[in-house]
Amino acid sequence: MTLVFVEHRDNRPERLSLEAITLARRHGGHVDAVLIGAECREAASALGAHGVSVAHVVEDTRLDAYAPAAWGAAVAQLAAGADAVVAAGSERGNEVMAHVGARLGQPMAANVTDVRPDGRWEVTRHRWAGSLLEDAALEGDPKLLTVAPHAVAVEEVAASSVDVRVFEPDVSDDDLRVQVVRHEPAAAGSVSLADARVVIGGGRGVGSAESFAILEELAGLLGAAVGVSRVVTSAGWKPHTMQIGQTGQRIAPDLYIACGISGAIQHIVGCKAAKRILAINTDPEAPIMSRATYAVIGDLHSIVPAISAEVRRVREGGA
């Protein structure tokens, strides 16, 4: 049996957790899930379409808010008898699994893209910000690993019912010393970077915080999210929550429009799962050009407003 730690939001399992379930399911045996936090039952019931047979839900009000040590304790207690424990390679997934490894005294492989469990467990995983693939043997019992974001496509199966079971973990007060105490809601009408089908990214070439207005205008027309490169957050133009890259968010939209972004490897790590990349840059030799599906060489301050104008014209039925 493989146990998958499933993150959820708005009563739905997170996409990265569904990717982790897909990888776990590919290698035989039945898959159980564990969900923790408020209102996790509805998210658990949706896992039948992804091959989960049993979903363990932790309905403890002390754990409604994220508490990494306590959540790790719950997963570790459920791991008894599992061949492997898998989670998404998200910030939360990696942190919880680190606690699981510490409690069980077992190693944990992060950012895995493939597993070969015949006999000796061998894994392939991302290293050096995704610029290198490493093949390694994973020791320990159970095997602990997280799945690299967007390295595995979500696969559904014929829907079946899920056996939802309530689990009551043994959690101490010490386990609850660190926990989330408040959430800052996103601005009304904003689109999440993680879920957006179109993302518009801005880099140094945008020039200033005020100049992001033209990117935000286009994003509004396309129902897109706006992201930024690290240099933008370092300059204080935009918050870190908007950063795409190795130390920011990893995205997988249908289209990524990169405006004034050179394309350093740290940024490419965050956007390489995009199905298509449109790069707008004055430098035809910018590294991102080698990754782009389409490229426009020119000044984004002229090109982006022109795209917005064309979108409006088409929507208004212009010839």
Image: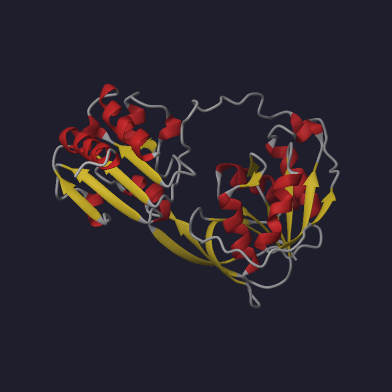
Q: Residue at x 45, y 43 (%)?
A: 196
Q: Position of residue 316 (x, y in %)?
A: 28, 38
Q: Nearer the viewer, residue 30 or 245?
A: 30
Residue 69 horizontal side relative to residue 232, left or right: right
Q: Residue 143: tell me if it is visible.
A: no
Q: Nearer the viewer, residue 132 or 26?
A: 26
Placement of 304 over or under 296, stated as above or below? above
Q: Residue at x 46, y 31 (%)?
A: 190
Q: Position of residue 103 (x, y in %)?
A: 74, 48
Rendered-image quadrant of the C terminus: top left
Q: Position of residue 210 (x, y in %)?
A: 28, 22
Q: Residue 223: tell me if it is visible.
A: yes
Q: Position of residue 198 (x, y in %)?
A: 38, 45
Residue 66 horizontal side relative to residue 272, left or right: right
Q: Residue at x 68, y 73 (%)?
A: 28
Q: How is the image coloured?
A: secondary structure
